[in-house]
Amino acid sequence: MSDDNKLDFQQFRERVGDLRGKEYWRSLEELSRSEVFDEFFQSEFPQQALPLEKGVDRRDFVKLMGASVAMAGLTACRAPNETIIPYVNQPENLIPGRPLFFASAMPLGGYATGVLVESHMGRPTKIEGNPDHPSSLGASNSFQQASILGLYDPDRSQVVRRAGEISTWSEFVAALQPLLSAARTNGAGLRILTQTITSPSLGAQIQQMLTQYPGARWHQWEPVSGDNAREGARVAFGGYANVIYDFTKANVVVSLGSDFLSEGPAHLRYARDFSARRRVRQGDARPMNRLYAIEASPTNTGSVADHRFPVRPSEIESWARQVLAALGGAAAVPAADATPATPVAPQAMARDLAANRGASIVIAGEDQPPAVHALAHALNSALGNIGSTVLITDPVEVAPVNQLESIRQLVTDMNAGAVQTLVILGGNPAFDAPADFNFGGAYQKVPFRAHLSLYYDETSMLSHWHIPETHYLETWGDGRGHDGTVSIIQPLIAPLYNGRAASEVIGALVGGLDATPYQAVRNYWFGRGATEATWRQWLHDGLINGSALPARGATGAPPAVSTMDTVGAPQDGLELIIRHDPTIYDGRFANNAWLQELPKPNTKITWDNVMLMGPGTAEDLGFGGRERDPLVNERRTRMAELQHGNVRMELPVWVLPGHAEGAVTIFYGYGRRQGGEVATVKGPGFDTYPFRRSTTMHGGPGATVTMRSGSVYPIACTQEHQSIDPKIVGDRNIVRAATFAEYQTNPGFAHQGHHAEFELSDASMYPPFQYTGHAWAMAIDTTLCTGCNGCVAACVAENNISVVGKEEVVREREMHWLRIDRYFKGDPGNPEIYHQPVPCMQCENAPCEPVCPVAATSHSEEGLNDMTYNRCVGTRYCSNNCPYKVRRFNFFHYADYDTPALKPMRNPDVTVRTRGVMEKCTYCVQRINHARIEAAKQDRRVRDGEVVTACQQACPTQAIVFGDMNDPGSGVAQLKKEPTNYALLGELNTRPRTTYLATIRNPNPELAAAAAAGKAEAH
Amino acid sequence: MAQIFHRSANTLSRVTIFGAIFIAGFILWVIGGIVRSPYFTNQGVQREQAVPFSHQHHVGGLGIDCRYCHTSVETSSFAGIPPTSTCMNCHSQIWTNAAVLEPVRQSFASGQSLQWNRVHRVPDFVHFNHSIHVAKGIGCASCHGRVDRMNLVYQATPMTMEWCLSCHRNPEKFVRPRDQVFNMDYVPVNQKQLGPQLVKQYNIRKLTSCSTCHY
C-alpha cells in the first residue's frame, strides 16, 4: 500500500468543502473516494460470490454436481404425510388460524413498558407496544421485539443445579430450611441481591421477608443503574425523586449527554412527544422545537439534534454552568475552567432558553455525574420549567438506593464473613459488578450462595444453587412504568424450561404454603381493593388506570448549585467514556442473536464492541500509515491498547465522525464467558467491565491509547453493505435536507436547484398500469427518524428473518429486509448526521421484475413487487438490477429448521425461506391480505390505518406511514402531496411507492450566523 | 474400404434428428401427465384414520351441517377440526359402547388429542383462507367434492396451482349463492347467467397476483 492510502483527514475536509464533491456521505471511505473503494462497488456484492471454502476442489465439485443432477429426480417429492391434532376441549375465544392479543408488560432495568403480545394458538410470536400504556403509546423498541427470541432461546437454563449437578426445586427448598431457622434465631447473615425493582407485589414480599428476618438485608445492583440520576435528584430536591419530562410542551430542549430518545424507561414516550413538535406539514403553522445536544459520543438523540456540540465529557459540566450563569444563576461558574470550544454557543443557547421560559427542557444523561444532573434541575428550576415541562413525582422504585454503595456494602460484608446466605434474584454481578470489588472472589466466601437467572452464567458458575428463571412472558408479575403506572405482567405461555419467578424464591425464603406467582400478584392487589371486575379490566387494558404517580408541587427554592460536587476542570490527555452496549444492553441480551446482528445505531457494527474515537484523535494516534488499506473502518480495523488506571486491554479501533476529540468510548456487555453459545462463541467481543471500577463507572480522564501495528481485526459493519453505489448516485442527493427557515421560504426545496435536473417525466413506452383497487404506498419522514432500530427488529420478528452470524455479515450476507442508512454531511469532526430507513421501494416500474427468468418476482395489481419464494431459482439477476439494493439472497440454509425450541417462535403467516432464494420486504403483505379478507367479508374497502406494517407499528416517532395511495383521505396520500416528498433516485423513473419526506432541522439562526462569521474569519 | 454403416443408418439418423423434437415433447407430455396424476396430487387417495369417521353417514345420512364440526370455516383461514368434545356431544348419549369409538372415549377421558391423517394439504408457501372463499359464495363441494357421499374422506380435486387458477381466473363458472355454500346437493340451474351476476353482486375480483397466496 502506498502513502496515498493514508487516512488523510485534511483531504477529506477539502473534499467536503469541494462543491463538486458529494454533500452527503455514508462513510469516511466513501468520502475518500479511493480507487479501491470504487472497485469494491463495481463488483455487485464484493464478497458474496466467494469460492467454496471447505476445501472442495474442482474434481469433487464436478462429482457432486454430477451426483446431484443424477439424483435430482429422486428428490422430486410427494407431499409428506401430516397429522392434524385437534384439541380435546377447545378453549373459548380461540379460533385456530387467528391470533389473539394479550396485554402484558416487559420489565427492563426494573421499569415496565406495556406491550401487546400476539399469540398463535398459545404460542407468543410477536410483541407490539400497548397504545394505552403511557411509556409506550403503541411503539416498541428492539429489546421488546427481540424478547420473543429470548423466550424461546434454547440456551436458556432449563434445570435447577446444585454445584453444577442437576437437582430439583424441592431439594433447594429443603436445603434452605436449616439456614432459615438459623436466620430466624440470630437474624443476621441473610442477604438478598436484586436488580432495580418497581414491582409493588414483589416489593411487599421482600418487605415481609425483611420483617420476618430482622437481620436480613436487601441489596440492589444493576450495571445500568440510574445512580447518577438518583443522586442528582437527591441533591436538587432534597430526596429521591422521579423526574418526568413533557416534550410536547418544550420549544427548546438541551441534552447534556442524554440519549433520551433511545435510552431509559420512558424513551419511547419521549420520542413520540418530541417528534410531535417536529412534524413539519403544509398548512400547519406550529413552529418546530429545537434540540441542542452536548455530548461526547454520538447518540441517536445527538444525531437528530439541530445543534450538536461534540465535547469531552469533562467539559459538559462547564457548559451547563455557563448556560446557568448566562441565565443569571448566581455563583454558577466556580472556576476559570469554563472554556468551551465555541464560547458563543452557551450564550446563544441561554438566550434561546430564556425566550422559552416554562417551555424548555434541560435533560442530563445517565452517564453524566450527579453534579450535571443537579445542574440540569437547577437550569429547569431557573427557567420555570418545573411543574410545566418537568414534573417531579415520588420515586417509582420500591426502595431507591445508591446501588453502587449497596453492592459495595455487600462485598465488604462478604469479605468480612458477615454474610451466611446470599440469594441473588436475577442479574449477573460476577460479570458486571464494579471490577475493583472483585465480586466473584468475595462471593465465594459466602457459605450458601443461590442464584436465580435466565442463563447458567458467570454468577451461576460460582453459586451453590442455580435456579432457572422464568421469562416475563412465562410468569405473573407487576411493575411500574416511567410515570408510576402499574401494569400487571401476564404470562402468554407456561414456563418452557421449568423456570421459577423471583416471587417464588422469596416465597421459599418466607416459608409457609407455596404461593404461585399468580396468587402472589393477585393476593397483593385484592388486598388493596381490587375486585374480579377491576382485575379483569387491568389485565385487558394492560395497566391500572390512574395509577400514575401524582406530580409534586414545584419545589420552593432552586437547588443550591454552589454546594454541588464538581468533576473539576477538564484535563489534558484522553478521556475514557464507558457506556452500555446499544443492542445487547449490559450483556444480558448477549445470547440474543437478533440483537447481536442488529447494526448498532451510528456505527452500524454488528456482533462486536469497539473503541470509538473521532477522526482527529485517530490521526494523532497514528491510525493510518503504510499497512492501512482502504477498507479499514468498513470491513476490518486495527487493534490498539487502551490503558486506564492499571487496566490494559487491546480493543479494535473505530473512527466515528462526530465523536468528540480527546476522548474514546468503549461499550460494556460483550466478552461473556458463560451463558449461551451465541454470547460466548458467536459474538464474543471484548469484556470491558475491568475498566468499570467503582471510581470510573462511566469512565474518566487519564486514558492512553497505543496503536498496535500489524494486528488486523475483522469487523462486521453493515453501512457499506448492499448500499447504493456512489457512482449511480453521482452528484444527486439521496438525503435531502434544509433548515426550517429555508423550508418556510421555499417548501419545495427538495425538488429544486441541485435536484431539479434529475426530475423526470413519467414517460414510458408501455401503457401505464391501472391500479383500480388499492395502491399501497409508504412515506418515511426522515426528519423524525432517530435511527433507533425498532423497525428493523420488528421486521425481523414479523417476517421470520434469519440471523447469519458475524462471518456471514462480513461477507455482506445479512438478511435484514429493512436497513437504516446513515449519512453524514459536512466536517468529519462534527458532521450533521442523517438516518434513512430503506425497505423495498415497491417500484411501479421495477427494474427487478423484467430480469427474472422464471417470473418469481412480478407486479401485483395493487402495486407490490411480489416475491414468490417457491418459484425463485436464485439467479440473483433481480438483486443485480435493483438500484436500491434492498433484495437479500439466502446463500446458505440460514433459517434454523431443526432446533425444536425455535419452531413455535415463527410467524405462521410468513413462509420460512430456504437456501437459494431471494427475499425482500413485501410491505408485510400478510397483514395486507388479512385486512383485505376481513374487509371483503364485510363488503367494504380496507380503511386507512387498518393495515399497519411491522416497521410502522414499532416506530416510536411515527416516521413511517403506510396506506392506500388511491384513497385520497389516507394518511399516506396526504404525505405524498407534501412539498418535501421526494423519491429516492426518482430520476431512474422507477416510480417507487416508498418515498421520503426531506429532513428539516431547526438550527438557531444566531448560531448559524456566528458559524458563518467564524468561517469567514478563518479564511 | 468398406462402408462402416449400412445405408439404412441414414434413415435411422434422420429419424433420430428430426424426431428429437417430438421425443422431447413426448417426454415433457409424460412428465406433465405424471405431475397431474393422483400419484403426485393424491387426488382420490383414501387415508386410514384412527377412527373411521364416515362423512357419508354424518352428513349425507344424518344431515349434520358442515359448520357443526368445522366451526371456524366462516371466520378463519383454517376450517377447524372438531375437538373430541364435539364428538362426545352426541356420543356420550348414543353408541356409547361402540368399539369403533373407543379412541374417541379414550381421548376424552385421558385428555390426549385424537390424531387425524391430513387429507387436504397445501404446501407451507401457500396461504389459503377458507373464510373468504365461503363468504364469496364458493361451495364446500366445489373443492372438496361430494363429502356427503364419502365413507372415508379423500381429496376430490387435484388441488394444483393450475386448478386454483382455473377458478381465480373464471370465478363466474363456480360461484354460487351464499345460502347454497354448505349445500352438498346444489346443482346450478343457469350458471352462465347466474355466475356473472353473482360475481358482480359479491364484488368478486379475479385475484391472480402471486402475493394473493404466496408470501
Image: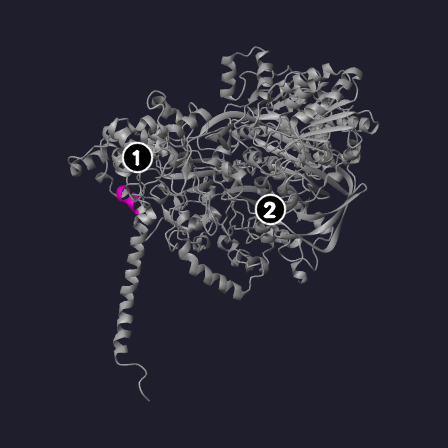
Which element is circle 2 on?
loop
Disc 2 residue type (three-letter): Gly
Q: Which residues are magenta?
A: B162-167
Nearer to us in this view, A127 or A640: A127
- Left or right: B34 with respect to A716? left
Residue drawn at the location 58% of the way across and 17% of the way down: A519
Residue B89 coordinates in the image, percent (x, y): 36, 22
Q: Is residue A437 above or below residue A14?
A: above
Give the colour scheme shown: one colour
Residue drawn at the location 28% of the way across and 28% of the way down: B58
Residue A739 in view (yes/no): no
**Numbered mark located on residue B133 in the image:** 1
- Picture quadrant where residue A518 is located: top right
Residue A866 coordinates in the image, percent (x, y): 39, 45
- Left or right: B160 with respect to B108? left
- Picture quadrant where residue A841 is located: top left
Q: Which residue bears the numbered disc 2?
A: A826
Q: Main secondary structure of the magenta part?
A: helix
- The chain containing the residue under callout 2 comes to A
Residue A713 coordinates in the image, percent (x, y): 67, 52
Disc 1 residue type (three-letter): His
Nearer to us in this view, A291 or B150: B150
Asked if the magenta segment contains residue A809, the reply would be no
Which residue is the extreme one toward the bottom? B1
